[in-house]
Image (spheres, helix red, strand yellow):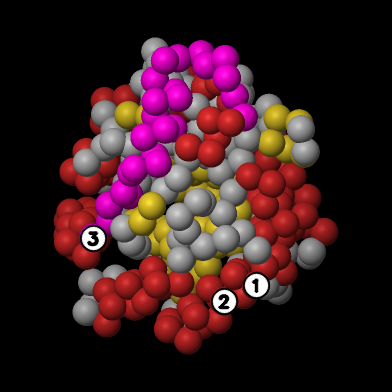
Amino acid sequence: MPTPVIITCAVTGSVHTPTMSPHLPITPDQIAEQAIAAAEAGAAILHLHARDPQTGRPTPDPDVFMRFLPRIKQATDAVVNISTGGGMPMTVAQRMEAAVRAAPEMASCNMGTMNFGLFQALDRWSDWHHAWEPDFLEASRDFVFKNTFADIEALHADLAEARGTRFEYECYDVGHLYTLAHFVDRGIATPPLFLQFCLGILGGIGADPDNLMTLKRTADKLFGTNYQFSVLGVGRHQIPLTTMAAAMGGNVRVGLEDNLFLDKGVLAESNAQQVRRIRQVLEGLGRPVATPSEARAMLALKGGDRVAF
């Protein structure tokens, strides 16, 4: 039987702003509703950020997370993956707070310090809903997304060791794989690894098939068979690169964090709509969609009964 494909849905993120789409979930109710619908459509993992309910600005506040995490857990069996990437200008300590409090089955772990440019979006919109939006995007011109060796060590100590949380290792460039190999060699990161190849962010590796092949070959060389990989493609690259990932035997990530559109010029009305789109692709390729239970077994997760929400 073909290996099941894990669909991750990144529900809201910290990249897009409210002006860019009326369908971007902002409030705890909206995030919960869209996350639950995405799980019902076939997402086994829900990758979650939080936003200020009044302004839509990304927030690290654990109290805001706790307004939607229990509701999602009660309504679905999906694996909850809490971002530790946060957003500008959060400190690393702030970015970790929600995951430390909630002790989820999974959290993201970004594998290197990098530029993370969002300012190019300023040319596409002009009538902003909130004053913070253009300033937020412009600030990325001089923003360093900090993920040092010490930061990665702290994540593993506070989440993996202390709370049994495993990671979605977000790799935005080839060097990030070598950094992860360093942590594997030290016994800090332990297989089975779940690698998220992130292609298309300005400051990271470009979104093209050759780069995806390079990431996969490098992961094979460094980790052998002790890993699962998933792929996200930013914007219009979402479906082409996730389709390629599925054809290569990998897993996929979709969602409004990574891409606001369903087709060229057509906004996605929900996260579930994107999940259904990639599910159609997977079924056309003969790849079964993993259930949350299958995802837990593939990634050696602790189980939804051992979280703190």
Q: What residue lies at 67% left-to-right and 68% top-to-bottom?
A: 209
- Mark 1 element type: helix
Disc 2 residue type (three-letter)? Thr
Of residues 39 and 146, the one drawn nearer to the viewer in this rendering: 146
Task: Between residue 51 and residue 80, name the one nearer to us.
Answer: 51
User: What's the CA distance linking mark 2 and mark 1?
Assistant: 6 Å
Going from N to C along the chain, the mark reached first, 3 or 1, is 3
Q: What amino acid is found at the position of numbered circle 3 in the picture?
A: Thr
The quadrant in which the N terminus is found is bottom right
Marks 2 and 3, Cα distance to the nearest angstrom? 24 Å
Provide the residue designation for mark 2.
214
Whether the magenta-drawn stretch holds residue 261 is answered as: no
Q: Are marks 2 and 1 in contact (CB under 8 Å)?
A: yes
Q: Tag 3, which secondary structure?
A: loop
Which stretch is magenta?
124-148
Residue 271 percent location from the top left of the image: 62, 35
Label 1 environment density (alpha carbons within 10 Å; few <14, some 14–19, many ≥20) = few
Q: Disc 3 designates what residue?
A: 148
Using the image, determine if residue 129 lies above or below residue 195.
above
* Residue 233 vs residue 128, the one in the foreground: 128
How busy is the neighbourhood of tag 3: few (under 14 within 10 Å), some, or many (20 plus)? some
| Residue 210: mark in rendering | 1
**Could you tell me which residue is drawn at 22 percent across and 41 percent down?**
91
